Amino acid sequence: MIDQKQLLKTIETALAEDICTGDITTQTTVPENMMISGSFIAKAAGVICGMDMSKAVFAYVDAKVVFNSFFNDGDTVSKGDVIARIEGRAASVLTGERLALNFLQRLSGIATKTRETVEKVSAFPVKILDTRKTTPGLRIYEKYAVRTGGGFNHRFTLSDGILIKDNHIKAAGGIQSAVQAARRFAPHTLKIEVEVETLGQVDEALAAGADIIMLDNMDLNTMAHAVARIGKRALTEASGNMDQKDLEMVAATGVDFISIGALTNAVIPLDISLKFD
Amino acid sequence: MIDQKQLLKTIETALAEDICTGDITTQTTVPENMMISGSFIAKAAGVICGMDMSKAVFAYVDAKVVFNSFFNDGDTVSKGDVIARIEGRAASVLTGERLALNFLQRLSGIATKTRETVEKVSAFPVKILDTRKTTPGLRIYEKYAVRTGGGFNHRFTLSDGILIKDNHIKAAGGIQSAVQAARRFAPHTLKIEVEVETLGQVDEALAAGADIIMLDNMDLNTMAHAVARIGKRALTEASGNMDQKDLEMVAATGVDFISIGALTNAVIPLDISLKFD
Amino acid sequence: MIDQKQLLKTIETALAEDICTGDITTQTTVPENMMISGSFIAKAAGVICGMDMSKAVFAYVDAKVVFNSFFNDGDTVSKGDVIARIEGRAASVLTGERLALNFLQRLSGIATKTRETVEKVSAFPVKILDTRKTTPGLRIYEKYAVRTGGGFNHRFTLSDGILIKDNHIKAAGGIQSAVQAARRFAPHTLKIEVEVETLGQVDEALAAGADIIMLDNMDLNTMAHAVARIGKRALTEASGNMDQKDLEMVAATGVDFISIGALTNAVIPLDISLKFD
Amino acid sequence: MIDQKQLLKTIETALAEDICTGDITTQTTVPENMMISGSFIAKAAGVICGMDMSKAVFAYVDAKVVFNSFFNDGDTVSKGDVIARIEGRAASVLTGERLALNFLQRLSGIATKTRETVEKVSAFPVKILDTRKTTPGLRIYEKYAVRTGGGFNHRFTLSDGILIKDNHIKAAGGIQSAVQAARRFAPHTLKIEVEVETLGQVDEALAAGADIIMLDNMDLNTMAHAVARIGKRALTEASGNMDQKDLEMVAATGVDFISIGALTNAVIPLDISLKFD
Amino acid sequence: MIDQKQLLKTIETALAEDICTGDITTQTTVPENMMISGSFIAKAAGVICGMDMSKAVFAYVDAKVVFNSFFNDGDTVSKGDVIARIEGRAASVLTGERLALNFLQRLSGIATKTRETVEKVSAFPVKILDTRKTTPGLRIYEKYAVRTGGGFNHRFTLSDGILIKDNHIKAAGGIQSAVQAARRFAPHTLKIEVEVETLGQVDEALAAGADIIMLDNMDLNTMAHAVARIGKRALTEASGNMDQKDLEMVAATGVDFISIGALTNAVIPLDISLKFD
Amino acid sequence: MIDQKQLLKTIETALAEDICTGDITTQTTVPENMMISGSFIAKAAGVICGMDMSKAVFAYVDAKVVFNSFFNDGDTVSKGDVIARIEGRAASVLTGERLALNFLQRLSGIATKTRETVEKVSAFPVKILDTRKTTPGLRIYEKYAVRTGGGFNHRFTLSDGILIKDNHIKAAGGIQSAVQAARRFAPHTLKIEVEVETLGQVDEALAAGADIIMLDNMDLNTMAHAVARIGKRALTEASGNMDQKDLEMVAATGVDFISIGALTNAVIPLDISLKFD
């Protein structure tokens, strides 16, 4: 699902940042053709994500490195599980180690957090969404990790979704005129989402024909009223520091989506280490 | 301290990732020459970092946007503080908003965490160091944030420091031969650091003439013995899940440095928002 | 509306292609500081497009070149009109001339053709759309020219619109399952468009809840029936060699959109020349 | 004849423009490993060009896609001919389809137009030339299509030919001094071509020792006199809206070359479609 | 004469190579806003070249650095001459110093060597040429230095000149057929040069109608005969380890050009240093 | 030891510089599938360097070219030795020839000069070092050639070594404060080198705790005194126009290192040619 060409560029950039003119320690202390083998071990339970990317890091450094994974992205691992084995030239493995682990730990951290979040609301027909609060340069990977954890993706860029916020509304002179302008000039392939904070705005958005209404920073009671008033005439999305809310209660209001920036911008990496034999 | 040319490239890449073919919402709903103004507000206390970078984001998008900051990187802010004001074309400000906030929140998060860590050990003559566990593509910024918070930087790349680890030692056939090889072939401008886990290895590293000895994953008692045995003949660095240790106790062993990967790879962003007038 | 940073890159690439190691004729025959002035003249009537781009070409080559335009993009010009004046170092003007004219002629050609098309159906509430049949590397400019001529843009990339065609339907096992899959996995900000060729497929698309139905290669009678059957429950788009059809008749069927690849892939440039004083 | 490395870059850029963050329709509706096959069919007669490029597009997307062509570049096809067969992963084929067709249709359009032009003057020993009026970014491909159609290439860039035009002559203070300057300073590997509009200028160019004389916008009678007066002392090239002239009459004047901008800048694509089985 | 845009890229690449993550010495020891001034001093006599490039290096690093040159490219300097003064932020000046000197020394070395060579043959109407034996990445600058020293440029790339060598002749089946093929297929703007080693080949080249005949590795006597036999029917170029020949004798044979690879590939830099006040 | 990915980029850039839009001579005179074979011959004795790079050049152009080398980098060759054989498509071999030879000749020139220098001081335990006076864009290759010749590398970039020179000392207010500042703020993995010119400065550097002391432009007597006074408390490096000094006498002073800019910036290429069968 991750474009391989784009991944190669990400790896190239990241390795250049890490290596500069060369891995001087390895070059001076490790015999050029010495072989090495080792295990990637989960030091904590979680959802694995980034297996193919880690494999690609080593393949980029040296096509002869053998990387065998025992879990697929999305699988649950327990503390102590050997998740992959690696074998190849020591210099190559040591050169790729840090970047491969950086990817694996960060993406698994996101997938694990997403899975926990999804499970909290599993009793409800609601989808957990990410946001654009991702790490600059890594968005497609972090959004992949959200999908791996069972979440869904909100728009990828400012080009593939219309989200009319507070300031757009002010600038356009009201919800009605903002929605009209978007409908008139934007590609007809895009739905129109409007961010509202009050029930009055909900009514305006409905009247304007919004396809999606984002209920931003509403208390639970107002949110429930908003969902009821909308009555399936538009999709509904709960938003605003959702990681600090009682998600079951939010889901219980009947919203279609809950979007959570913290899925990607407050990530604790899953502890995974590479132990050589 | 951050290279401006490199920063422009980072901004260019990040904006391209976010914008793709255009900010369709702003383009269709906001009049092209409408002006806007607003305040960046700290929603929590912490150490600010990334002010110049945020300013550069807006300058990149539109040279006429005016960004006035009321705090410098390294300043402490309280919840509710207005940390900067912005004024300019609405379309320009809205286009740069997300990236500027992403930078500001992440780097301030790192600076805040570093400051807290540094203060924990302020009674001791020890330096807090970062590691290479940084976000791919953002290392120079994250290491700048560590400095901003009062920490110090370990090596930036594999080229500007020699760190002989477990696997290098195995590959070279022992600490003695690894250090000799590095001394023989590596540039003489680099010190030689050796990672050890036991007191026996400490003795070997000393005998080999290591300049720095990294005490990795040692319990406090062993670490204290190691420091005593070394007796200033080499610099000492404590390492290994240091964010989960009692740092005062670690500092009390007399080590010169404590390196902590979590400063940069387990970051909770400082909550900062942009509120338009 | 055109991103200036992206435009600079397009200009850089195009000039590199044209100049290689240098404009050897100009370098050897034109005194380095000689000045020149001249007029851009329309050799045929049409709609102007690309004024800012042409100006940017010269500004890129030499910031001191003065380019004054007497018409804006979207204005109609007559044969013989002086549309702009230029003045500056001869070497700079001669270096940028070819690329500036290439842009101006091609984009004005697209805008002119679009305007003619739009006017043909001006009695109907239908929008004329472009397609993805654009010149590799120039899509955003060509789509801008379509807007300049009074047309509207279909999706810019494969990421900002869902268009389920024949092959997606086969692959998914039917219209019903294709639409369901898209609704389940694609970002909720995107509408779902389905391409159909028969009235039977129209019914299936409606049953599946398609937001937009593309009526592909239908004869006028079938198209009219399709529009009637849909009855505003979905948007309708006529498609398939539309440049060879009687557009008024197509519009009369009541479709919401007509998309025409030939707007951008069969372009006759508007004849514009640069005449030096 | 087309540099493969350069072609890969063109493909990379063009696909990035088309795909952005991913082909969302295909990703969500087509099973990841589903296979597909189909035929490229000529919908009109013409000269095929771009076969290898189209093949390279699919190979770039997915090395396992099999593309078998039944015609080579330069072959004539009839309406209805199956010109190639394709087979591979549906997702890969659908991703490359648009770009491959864009190349194939445009280049075949150029080759077809060139072939028709060449045939018009086949009774004369004249060569048909292209110009620098090509699509920014696609020059080497469009000039290849001209060769494929039986035409010849004028200079590729401003570096590989000297063409002294009106403005160079003015700047240098006359044809004599312009030619002298070029002969003195330009690499001796380049011929010197001078653009003239009158018989008086023809004499000046001859006196100055021009290697090639471009007869620009001359009526047929003047052109014939010019060719006679030159009498093989220099090569002759007819130029100026040549696509609107009676080419046989132009050729009959005895010129060595006729250069035609419209070969590349007023292209009607050859209609070719991909029909899946 | 040097394209400024291209120069900026060369500087960017070269500084990145030199600086990596930062000039750690300057950053840690020099106060951020300290000013500095100094003189560029010629430590040997020679011809200056690269003044504008050196100035551009500092301008790239810091637009506020003031660089005043007292000599222009092509001027002769004596040992001890102050050739330029510089003033600005110490950190900026120190960062650009090495690259500016590298450029200045190398290009001045080439210009000096070329000037000496040109003067050796000043009694003869012969031009001294460079070759393609230049430093990868620096060709346009090195060829500029040759011009600065009074030499002339042979072709810049394989695209802007036809030079039929030994192997092309073998491949084509003889001089006659090689020249014919080039005349038939190559752009008519290029002359045809043929490399020959014997008088027999001279005759063949003349018969084939070569525009230029390269006399490669001929002894002086043969060369003189060749020039006489050609008798101005083609241009003549002496080639082959010319830096080791008696150039006056070569010039005396009457050849039009002498090309010398050593002008650019065996360069002793002119000693220039930057002395701070 | 040379990073293959980086080498490919260097080759790509260099070939683009040399080829522009195509090798027009080869394309027009050499049959597309003609094969060729030949020998690389040393025209002078020396140390070979750049074998793998040359091979990579041809592999980049055409994967099917076979390049067999009979010597490894570092081997000594005699005049007349066949150092490699090549076989493949004539067009491919001719396209890569110039760049492959440029690399091979330049790097072998550096290796040869380094070997000669190293041998001059072979009776002493001193290491010969290069400097940062390398060709912009080629540093890693030129430093590799120095190693190949038996020399050692000084720092690669301004990031991997601290070298406090005259101006840093002035700026910091003395040697003592400069060294203190570097020790406080620079990564602890770097040694601190100080450049001195007098014995007084030697004492200051020692007092400040410098790890390395560079003895710059000292006469032999002063240098000997300096080495004695330092007495192994710091490493010592002789510097300053060392290529013009009696190196044995310099070595006899007991310095640990001698650094010589001329190893890389005043290179006479080793004469190597490609002779086709």
Image (tube, coloured by chain):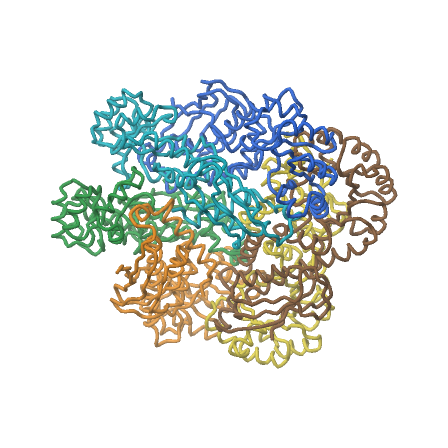
Chain colours: A brown, B yellow, C blue, D cyan, E green, F orange
Residue B137, percent across and down? 59, 54
| A111 shown above or below B52 | below
Q: Quadrant of residue A206?
A: top right
Q: Quadrant of the N terminus of chain C?
A: top right
Residue C101, percent across and down? 45, 29
Q: Nearer the viewer, residue D79 or B45?
A: D79
Residue A212 placement, left or right of F52:
right
Q: Nearer the viewer, residue E96 or E68?
A: E96
Residue E165 placement, left or right of F203:
left
Q: Quadrant of the C terminus of chain C?
A: top left
Q: How many marks?
A: 0
Residue D115 placement, left or right of F203:
left
Q: Quadrant of residue B136?
A: bottom right
| D125 shown above or below D86 | above
Q: Residue at x 70, y 68 (%)?
A: A43
Q: Nearer the viewer, residue B214 or C168?
A: C168
Q: Residue at x 30, y 41 (%)?
A: E185
Residue E229, percent across and down? 12, 45
Residue C153, percent across and down? 61, 33
Residue D236 placement, left or right of A60:
left
Q: Residue at x 46, y 27 (%)?
A: C66
| A269 shown above or below A153 | below
Q: Nearer the viewer, residue D10 or B241?
A: D10
Q: Residue at x 84, y 36 (%)?
A: A199
- Whether residue F238 is visible: no
- Whether residue C17 is visible: yes
